[in-house]
Image: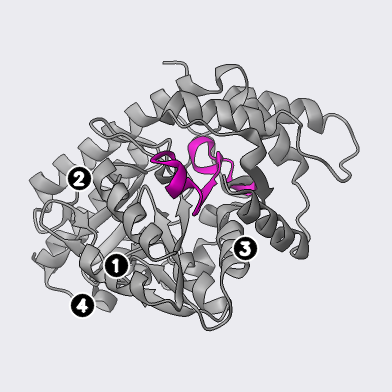
Amino acid sequence: MNYDFDHLPDRHGTFSYKWDEVASEFPQAPDVIPMWVADTDFPCPKEIVEAIQKRAAHPIYGYGQIDHDSAALLAQWEKKRNQWDVDPQWITYCNGVVVGLNAIISAFSEEGDGVIIQPPVYYPFREAVEKTRRKLCLNELYNNGDHWAIDFEQLERLAKDPCNKILLLCNPHNPVSRVYRRDELEKIGEICLKHHVVIASDEIHSDLIYPGHKHIPIASLSPEIAAITVTAVSPSKTFNIAGLQMSALIAPSRDMLERLEEELDRRCYIPNLFGSIAWKAAYSDGGCEEYVEELMNYLWGNYLYLDQYLREHMPKIRCQKPEATYLMWLDCSGLGLEQEELKRFFVEDARVGVEEGTLFGGASASFMRMNIGCARATLKQALEQLESAYQKRGF
């Protein structure tokens, strides 16, 4: 192993939102172990560190530009990892996937139009709809006992309404950790094509896939589906560089791409100098694929440790088997606690800072989201604290 994920640098005092803002986020328990914000505690690949250090040695940090090779490098990455033939001319850039989703909503709908989301889902989806004064249309996932699934009959009913213009798709799906199968994606594409609904597909976690699953970009299914789809991607989750604010939107339709770029121009998009450098380092010459493989092996080990610990010591809390991401969806229904009391149990009793399920909407009131993108020793400490609180409560 070339990367040591067990011995990690201290992030305190580095302007880390995750570590330096715990007192403001959890004022009732400022000593929590932070397992909430969706970044990891792992150093990014040495190739990225060295490229940034080299540029940082130059003492002028004026306006930057995106390297001319960046689009071709992303296309190469998508072809190699996802077998998707992306034309570099389909690509434009923005300061983060959430910014991109807001731009898509503004570009392809009007105030009052409906935007479909599929809760439980990453809560900026809901915020993006509300802040742009669109109508929130809920196609709630249901838990079939094995995994969370899409209610396609309801999706079709929502898509039939001509006022509903966009589907915000999350694949892999945060927080329920689904990697949608080809047949599921084909059904989504078929419904949206039939009813002229634009697909905005957030695929930011697409590199973080566990054994037995395969990420399929929905736009890769057919030219027809590609023509109604904008795909949002970023190296930020893969390489832990979210603070560099560099993402891409892929729109095979020339008309859609032009409308997106007009919207981004209105938002005064300015490239992040170091984001552009990190992008090139991440994706050049085969990219940092060895890092990704070692990262996923370590995260899978963290999941297995978590799952076994819960089964042996806290059987009333279950971790639904993840298909992707380092964000675990904990089913706490066996505890019999309402959401606010459940949050107090994790945060105040156990001193473990996680996010409550109700933030994500849908049937999630008995769930908590836990980030296991940390050293195993940190995960072990968090679980031991949780077990102590569990025993004191007499569960």
| Sequence-first disc among 4 and 1 | 1
Q: Which residue is mark 4?
A: 338
| Sequence-first disc among 3 and 1 | 3
Mark 4 or 1: the one toward you: 1
Mark 3 nearby-residue class (10 Å; few <14, some 14–19, many ≥20): many
Residue depicted at 71% across the width and 37% down the height: 276
Residue 32 visible in the displayed image: no
Mark 3 or 1: the one toward you: 1
Q: Which residue is mark 2?
A: 321
- The alpha-carbon separation of the residues under discs 2 and 3 comes to 33 Å
Circles 4 and 1 in contact, beta carbons < 8 Å: no
The one of 231 and 1 positioned closer to us in this rendering? 231
Residue 368 in the image, given as x and y percentages of width and height: 28, 62
Residue 80 in the image, given as x and y percentages of width and height: 47, 23
Circles 4 and 3 in contact, beta carbons < 8 Å: no
Name the amino acid, label 2.
Lys
Mark 1 nearby-residue class (10 Å; few <14, some 14–19, many ≥20): many
| Sequence-first disc among 4 and 3 | 3
Mark 2 or 3: the one toward you: 3
**What SS does tag 3 mark?**
helix
- The alpha-carbon separation of the residues under discs 4 and 3 comes to 36 Å
The residue range painted magenta reads 220-246
Mark 4 nearby-residue class (10 Å; few <14, some 14–19, many ≥20): few
Circles 2 and 1 in contact, beta carbons < 8 Å: no
Residue depicted at 36% across the width and 43% down the height: 325
| Sequence-first disc among 2 and 1 | 1
Q: Which residue is mark 1?
A: 155
Name the amino acid, label 3.
Ala
Residue 369 in the image, given as x and y percentages of width and height: 32, 58
**What SS does tag 2 mark?**
loop
- Residue 223 within the segment the image draws in magenta: yes
Mark 2 or 4: the one toward you: 2
